[in-house]
Every structure is written in structure tokens, then in C-alpha cells.
Amino acid sequence: MTRRCGFAAIIGAPNAGKSTLVNALVGSKVAIVSPKVQTTRMSVRGVALVGDTQIVFIDTPGIFKPRRRLDRAMVDAAWAGAGEADCIVLLADAEELATNPKGLAASDTHAIIEALRADKRKAVLALNKIDGMKRTDLLPLVQQLSGEGDFENVFLISALKGDGIGDVKTWVASRMPEGPWLYPEEQAADIPSRLLAAEITREKIYLRLHDELPYACAVESEKWEERKDGSVKIDQTIYVQREGQKAIVLGKGGAMIKLIGEMARKELEELFQRRVHLFLFVKVQEDWSEQRDRFRAMGLNFPEA
């Protein structure tokens, strides 16, 4: 049979569940997930197979009205991911849209639909988080969104529970062009190991400190040492903007950073299938979110002011 291969971008407002969906579509963890909105900062590629079709799913940062330089870089990365895709999946939080007191017109999803329409880009709509929603609330939302945008198809899914995921995957596969596969059959993601390791640690920070710590931290894998016994030694720096934030990350007697390190190391060993020696350091750098090198380390382009 003829092989097919192409790119499918998953775009949407912050906290729509894009990373959870990509992980479900790929069948393994390729993107970090946390309760915080805007957790994803860069585009991550996850690779899935449907028969003789290879799909490269692009997990993009949430699209919203940017206020800071980092916000602009994230939104730019999301639209860049959509720009290179053969298929676009607009993921929307059905529950949030159905209960938003400001209405659909005031939502980030509405702004995304308008931008797609202005650019004459077709997309498929996936309404996520439908668990527990009443049909009487869901159907009017589907009709309203379908009227707003020019969607090729509409899916009702639960990325967390896996409901409807197979239908989305099969439909996206049907839209992929003929061509050779870009990745080996066993490869599930296209992200440098250094960057993946940093992302895993950042996820653990958010999971443990999402109430206490604002979006004021970055993680960088500063050193990567391959050892003769097959293990790897990774030195990571956690950048924060204030001394008070450093104290939060460290915790009393260093207990919090020890816990974060243990959580990250355990997952990294599972991912890399070898022993990992992880060392975490916290550094206060007030202007880290304005430094070109930090953006490069996060896999983002640096937007000029």
C-alpha cells in the first residue's frame, strides 16, 4: 500500500486540553500536562501511526491575547505550527464555553475561529471535556460554533478519558498526503532529550506549586554527561524572578526541590529507560523572560519589541 505522512496541528485556547489530546493520540507521553493554563510554551511533535499513514501531531501553546514578550513568542509558535500543517484541529473546552458568562464572542476560541476564517484556513473542530455535560447544553454550542467557523468536521471528545479519540485520529489520517514516513516506526516524539528533560522538571514544579508559584520560572538543562555505565548525569537550573520564589521552590530545608527532583528523575528514567542522576539548582534572574538565550533554550523564537 502507498504510504502517507503529514502534519496535524492541535490549536486552541489555553487549558483546552491540547497536550492531553496529543498524548492520547500518540499513545504515550510527549507533552507535559498540568492544571495551569499556558503550560505548553513551545510546539512539540508527537508521532502516531494509522495503518500505512504516519501523522506528526503538533502540540502548540495556547492562543490568547498576548501581554508579555513570552506570551507573544508562545502565540507565534502556535500559529507557526498551524502554518506548516496539512490539517488543523481546533480544540475547544466545551464545558468552559457553555458556562462562560461573557459568551462565546468574548472567548479566545472565538478569536481563533475569526483568525482562521480571515486566513481562509479550514479546520476540524473537536469539542473537549464533554464528560457530564447535558445534551441540551452541548447541541446549541455545536450549532453556534459551526455557524461561526467553516469546519470540515466536528467531533465530541474527552481527551482525558479517551472518548472519541479514535475517530479524530482516523479522520486526520485520511487527510494526510502521500509520501514517505519522516520518522522510524518506533519513534513517538521529536523533541531533543535536553529539552524534554527540562520540560518534565517544569511540569513537576507546576504540579507541586501551581497555587504558590506564578508563571515566573523556566528550566534549562545546563549539562548533560553520558557515563560509562550507561547512565546520564543531568544538571538543570530553575530560573525564577525573585528571592521569595526561590524560597518556594526550595521549600523548608530543601524539601520541595528534593521532592520535585525525585518526581522528575523517576519519570525521566522511565522515558529514557536508563538510570538518571538529576541535580537541580535554583537561580534568581529577574529578567530571564526578556533574555534571548532563555527563549532559545525553551525552543522559542525571540520576538523583537
Image (tube, rainbow, N blue to C red):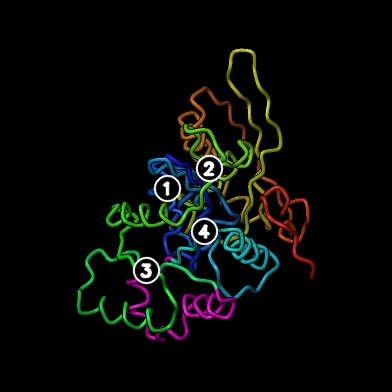
Evaluate if marks 2 and 3 touch, with contact meaning CB atoms under 8 Å apart.
no
Circle nearer the N terminus (4, 3): 4
Mark 4–mark 1 Cα distance, whole angstroms, equals: 13 Å
Q: Which mark is residue 271?
A: none
> Which quarter shows the N terminus?
top left
Residue behind mark 2 = 200
Q: Residues within 10 Å of mark 4 (few under 14, many from 20)?
A: many
Asked whether 262 falls inside the magenta stretch, the response is: no
The residue carrying pointer 2 sits among few (fewer than 14), some (14 to 19) or many (20 or more) residues within 10 Å by Cα, namely many
Q: CA distance from mark 1 to mark 2?
A: 14 Å
- Tell me the kind of residue under disc 3: Asn
First in residue order: circle 4 vs circle 1 = 4
- Residue extending furthest front? 1
Q: Residue tagged by mark 3?
A: 153
Tell me how many marks there are. 4
Pick the front one: 13 or 4: 4
Q: Earlier in the sequence, mark 1 or mark 2?
A: 1
Q: Is residue 274 above or below residue 299?
A: above
Q: Is residue 204 visible?
A: no
Choose mark 4 or mark 1, whichever is in front: 4
